[in-house]
Image: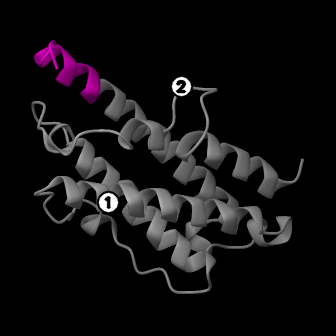
Amino acid sequence: MKLNEYLTNRLKEIFTEGKWVVGTNFKEQIYDLDWNKAIQKVEDFNTIADLTFHLHYYIAGVTKVLEGGTLDIKDKFSFDSPPIKSEQDWRNLVKRFCSDSEKFINLVENMTDEKLKDNFVDEKYGTYYRNIDAMIEHTYYHLGQIILIKKRLKNENPNK
């Protein structure tokens, strides 16, 4: 299997259609979620909306690089999400997350093994492969958080 095929399969698994490792994927966890639950705070955890914005921030930033642009994202801004004040605000974020995830997956699918082995923007960032693999691991980490937050929300409101 080529590197791009391997990464594409893993990206689909975590972002849009998989169920193998954790029995779900990011899209499945946010797609039908009510906006009030998405913004509901559980202790000092980030909200589901915050985590969705955070991951989308990185997807959009890395996608820009894959399209030939510059790397403009900074970790310190990755949680600077605009407030979600309505169902429409939440739907817009979910829609952007899903469509940009698909775009990201398609770009990776069309990368050559040689490109995946090249340095990502600068040698200090490692290879494209390393950065895409880190995106997958980062997403699994936050998906686990979302699953736990949803369980906590259900336990706080067992009749909802």
Mark 1 belongs to which amino acid? Leu
Q: Residue at x 72, y 45 (%)?
A: 9
Mark 2 belongs to which amino acid? Val
Q: Earlier in the sequence, mark 1 or mark 2?
A: 2
Can you say whether 131 is above or below 48 in the image?
below
Can the viewer see residue 127?
no
Q: Is residue 91 magenta?
A: no
Q: Residue at x 35, y 28 (%)?
A: 147
Marks 1/2: CA distance? 23 Å
| Residue that mark 1 sits on | 93
Image coordinates for residue 33, horizontal then vertical, percent: 29, 38
| Residue that mark 2 sits on | 22
Image coordinates for residue 67, horizontal then vertical, percent: 61, 81
Image coordinates for residue 15, horizontal then vertical, percent: 53, 46
Range of the magenta residues? 149-160
Q: Is residue 157 left or right of residue 25?
A: left
Question: Is label 2 in a helix, a strand or a loop?
Answer: loop
- Decide: few, some or many residues near mark 2? Use Cα within 10 Å; few <14, some 14-19, many ≥20: few
Q: Residue at x 62, y 51 (%)?
A: 133
Can you say whether 82 is above or below 25 in the image?
below
Picture quadrant of residue 150: top left
Question: Is label 1 in a helix, a strand or a loop?
Answer: helix
**Furthest residue in direction bottom, as rendered:** 69
Q: Residue at x 69, y 59 (%)?
A: 129
